[in-house]
Image: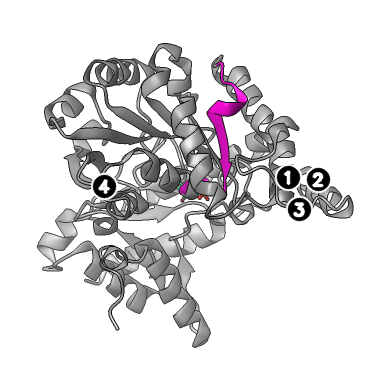
């Protein structure tokens, strides 16, 4: 019997494929150093875990409102007021089972069959697949390495067509670590208002920026509220990827549609995780500083080590926890036909796992995560250098 055309139109998450490959080798007793992770290696802070324990003890274990508990939606609103001076009402916020879920529900809510969605490349792997599942058409915007892969209003304007419904913007970016400057985002929002397109604004890595650079949220621009659909999550900032809590903020008509979709699919996010997320957003934020200090040290080491390998070059990322080095020189001079083939050889000869740039819509690059210990990073880079020198 056939499976559905819709399900067959997408491919499994390629970053998951790396994790599976690593798991397979580990299962055979072969040690692999993994630079693939898309999640923090830190543990969820104690105060957050305690609030979840309390929720269980108090039997907070029933279904909640489909949009998420009011207490958490109010905590999200307060966070957006505190950080960005934004004014949102409870019916303009919906809590979902992770940012990925928020994003997919938003796509289902706004995309009509055949609507075009613009995706700047390199992109996070799930964007194109979710657009396809929602019935939309993909249109990629090729970003340039020499501009540090930053989207500008001019590039966006050139890519618009009469069928453009939305553009997906991710800053800080997975996989490049680029951060879009506020001035540029203001111009992009102005264009979206003129052209009547939605901006799906994924700021899951908002708190992970370095060297004094500050993330600029579209939530600062209340005049662009009607076209701004914000996605955020507790996964990265609070080291809570397994708790599955994300949220979306936007115009009431979009958010109520997302809530309706949720009410018939997941019913509501996990009640216990919602209580934990209240503590994450409202409690002490001190642990973020410590986490950032460790990420900074790892990033600096990794950038320097990568740039010392002949044929590899990379920028110092301003945000998130990824580095996106250019390996085109190696591919050309060593006759290796793709970043995937390079990654395969690297795993099989050096036992170091990375994600090929092709997974993110950019051939000739790799994505390395520094959400792992400095020891693993040092040993991996040593092995990688030896591997490249031996090619
Ligand atoms: N957006 C980006 C750019 C991501 O990298 C991720 C996770 O890797 C997400 C959204 C979703 O995260 P979660 O579903 O854990 O909230």
Q: Is residue 227 left or right of residue 81?
A: left
Residue behind mark 1 = 276
Q: What stretch is highlighted in magenta?
A: 87-100
Q: Do the residues labelled 4 and 2 touch (CB within 8 Å)?
A: no
Q: Earlier in the sequence, mark 4 or mark 2?
A: 2
Label located before the other in sequence (2 or 3): 2
**Mark identifier at residue 51:** 2
Q: Residue at x 39, y 68 (%)?
A: 18
Question: Measuring 37% from the left and 43% from the top, which residue is drawn there?
Answer: 107
Q: Which of 357 and 302 is in front in this view?
A: 357
Residue 285 visible in the picture: no
Q: Nearer the viewer, mark 4 or mark 1?
A: 1
> Within 8 Å of ligand 1, the CB of disc 1?
no
Mark 2 vs mark 1: which is more N-terminal?
2
CA distance separating discs 4 and 2: 44 Å
What is the number of the mark on residue 182? none
Q: Where is residue 362 in the image (x, y as percent from the top left)?
A: 22, 51
Cβ–Cβ under 8 Å for marks 1 and 3: no
- The circle drawn on residue 62 is 3
Mark 2 to mark 3 CA distance (whole Å): 16 Å
Picture coordinates of residue 387, whole percent (x, y)? 31, 69
Q: Is residue 344 above or below residue 131?
A: below
Q: In front: 253, or 156?
A: 253
Give the residue number, with chain letter if any, for mark 4. Answer: 313
Mark 3 surroundings: few (<14), some (14-19) or many (≥20) residues within 10 A: few
């Amino acid at each position: 019997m056939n499976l559905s055309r819709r399900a067959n139109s997408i491919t499994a998450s390629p970053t998951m494929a790396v994790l599976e490959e690593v798991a397979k080798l580990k299962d055979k007793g072969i040690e692999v150093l993994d630079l693939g992770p898309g999640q923090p290696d830190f543990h969820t802070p104690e105060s957050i875990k305690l609030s979840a324990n309390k929720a269980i003890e108090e039997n907070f274990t029933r279904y909640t409102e489909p949009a998420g508990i009011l207490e958490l939606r109010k905590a999200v609103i307060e966070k957006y007021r505190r950080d960005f001076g934004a004014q949102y009402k409870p019916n303009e916020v919906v809590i979902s089972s992770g940012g990925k879920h928020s994003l997919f529900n938003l796509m289902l809510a706004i995309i009509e069959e055949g609507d075009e969605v613009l995706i700047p490349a390199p992109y996070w792997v799930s964007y194109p697949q979710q657009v396809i599942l929602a019935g939309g058409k993909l249109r990629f915007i090729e970003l340039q390495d020499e501009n540090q892969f930053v989207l500008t209003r001019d590039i966006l304007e050139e890519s618009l067509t009469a069928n453009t419904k939305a553009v997906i913007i991710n800053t800080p970016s997975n996989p490049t670590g680029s951060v879009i400057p506020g001035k540029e985002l203001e111009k992009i929002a102005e264009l979206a208002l003129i052209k009547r397109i939605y901006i799906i604004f994924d700021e899951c890595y908002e708190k992970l920026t370095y060297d004094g650079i500050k993330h600029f949220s579209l939530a600062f621009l209340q005049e662009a509220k009607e076209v701004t659909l914000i996605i955020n999550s507790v996964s990265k900032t609070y080291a809570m990827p397994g708790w599955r809590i994300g949220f979306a903020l936007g115009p009431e008509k979009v958010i109520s549609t997302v809530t309706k979709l949720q009410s018939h699919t997941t019913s509501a996010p996990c009640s216990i995780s919602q209580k934990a997320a209240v503590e994450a957003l409202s409690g002490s934020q001190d642990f973020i500083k410590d986490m950032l200090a460790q990420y900074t040290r790892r990033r600096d080491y990794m950038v320097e080590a990568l740039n010392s390998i002949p044929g590899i070059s990379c920028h110092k990322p301003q945000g998130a926890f990824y580095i996106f080095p250019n390996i085109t020189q190696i591919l050309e001079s060593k006759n290796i036909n793709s970043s995937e083939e390079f990654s395969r050889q690297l795993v099989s000869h050096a036992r170091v796992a990375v994600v090929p740039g092709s997974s993110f819509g950019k051939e000739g690059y790799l994505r390395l995560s520094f959400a792992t210990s400095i020891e693993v990073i040092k040993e991996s880079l040593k092995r990688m250098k030896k591997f490249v020198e031996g090619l």
